[in-house]
Image (spheres, rainbow, N blue to C red):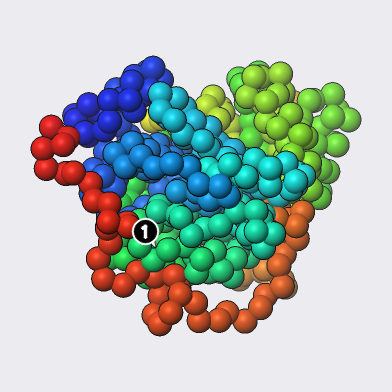
Amino acid sequence: MTKFSDLGLNPLLMKAIAEEGYETPTPIQAQAIPLLLEDKDLLGIAQTGTGKTAAFALPTLDFMLEFPQKRRARSARVLVLAPTRELAGQIADSFRTYSRHMDCNVQTVFGGVNINAQRRALQGGADVLVATPGRLLDLVGQKAVSLQEVEVLILDEADQMLDMGFIHDLKKIVAQVPKDRQTLLFSATMPKLISDLAQQFLDNPVRVSVTPPSTTAERVDQGVYHVSNNDKLELLFDVLNNPEIDRALVFTRTKHGADKVVRKLLAKGLDAKAIHGNKSQPQRLKALDAFKNGTCKVLVATDIAARGIDIDGISHVVNFEVPNVPEQYVHRIGRTARAGRTGLAVSFVAEDERYYLRDIEKTIGMEVDVLKAPDGTKVDLLPTPDPNERLYKPKGPARGNGGGRSGGGGRGGQRRPQAKAKPQGGAGKPGGKQGGRSRGGKKRKLEGARG
């Protein structure tokens, strides 16, 4: 079994890893770190909770230690892009944790907070800048930061950034980053748009994939309640009253729905908090802290706001509304099966959601068990549907997964105008590289330097 000590990381990083109590890398760390130490571009397919943040943070910090450089005003050597404030904050915390024994300034910028404080923080420059795309472009436009010194570009949760409408923002950002760089792109899913994006942004990347949907699904005990939409709130209260629940993460598809669920639970005497894009940053942090420390055992979230939340000890996931994207279901239920643990996920399926449930079952390769009503409930569950019934995709507007760009950075989460894309970064790839890369003449000393 591979150990961190086998990967050839700088001793200062090894010291921080040991202080965190880690000895054995996760699968994505074991696969990605050696490749990134060779300066390769990388396309990583991995969900939150697989250890992917350390998979890119450690080799990036190793590069900075091998090639120390004086910090330049209003610049950054490493740029990490993330879809939400929460994920950006967690990535920055990881970089700070592993760089505690080196001189490394980590800054975070995202929307929803005063931009002037972020401008001041960037005046002296940053070694690592973690940002949401909208706020970063605001700061670039105000000349508070330049991207001309970026040597490593990391796009985390790229599929979510596309879902949130950041595609044009990403192209604008990449066009301003030097072509001579290392680029890493991580995504929980691999739709065609991500493949296209990887072709544009990455130079001959290696691909690393861990935790396919079936693996997550097999670790989680799953069940469904067939219930009318009108009875879902009553059923949710009865399910959450189970004393075996330590922490429950409840998913709704809209911000309004999350608030409504919390109001109803509070009215019944059950403490719950909501997290979504309309909440201020202090409100979101307060809700997360209460959930983490156990003072509040129920957190209600939209998919986008919850993306990147990495909290251990979630015993139950409740899909109050079924997602219309099967991969989103896998991502949701995986939050209760971290680090190889098992978990329990239940879904409330109304008649108009049966199509989505069947789509999910095809993706995970198994039928989800139908559950009996909880003891003491007054809710009359719907009959179990005929598995041979022909189902049709619901008509009307596409069901969202979180109500737009909730939780994103820049302009209070408002969607940017969808301007026509312009050719960027010269011919071919926007901001792409031509020929080989040495990052300004810097090459790692791979032979003899790592023992």
Q: Camera-side residue: 104 or 373?
A: 104
Which quarter of the figure is the C terminus placed in?
top left
- Label 1 sits on residue: 181
Q: Is residue 153 above or below residue 48?
A: below
Query: Is 239 left or right of 30, judged from the image as shown?
Result: right
Q: Is residue 152 above or below residue 127?
A: below
Q: Residue furthest left?
A: 448
Which residue lies at the image location 40% right of the left edge and 53% below the top edge? Answer: 151
Image coords of residue 34 (percent x, y): 23, 43
Image coords of residue 180 (percent x, y): 35, 62
Which residue lies at the image location 67% right of the left edge and 75% below the top edge? Answer: 418
Can you see residue 159? yes
Q: Camera-side residue: 267 or 189?
A: 189
Element assignment for label 1: loop
- The kind of residue on which mark 1 rests is Arg
Which residue lies at the image location 72% right of the left edge and 41% below the top edge? Answer: 117
Q: Is residue 14 above or below residue 125?
A: above
- Crowdedness near tag 1: few (<14), some (14–19) or many (≥20) residues, C-alpha within 10 Å: many
Total number of numbered labels? 1
Can you see residue 389? no
Residue 375: quarter of image: top right
Q: Camera-side residue: 345 or 125?
A: 125
Image coords of residue 447 (percent x, y): 11, 42
Which quarter of the figure is the N terminus placed in?
top left
Residue 203: quarter of image: bottom left
Query: Is 364 left or right of 138, judged from the image as shown?
Result: left
Image coords of residue 234 (percent x, y): 79, 37
Which residue lies at the image location 42% right of the left edge and 63% below the top edge? Answer: 178
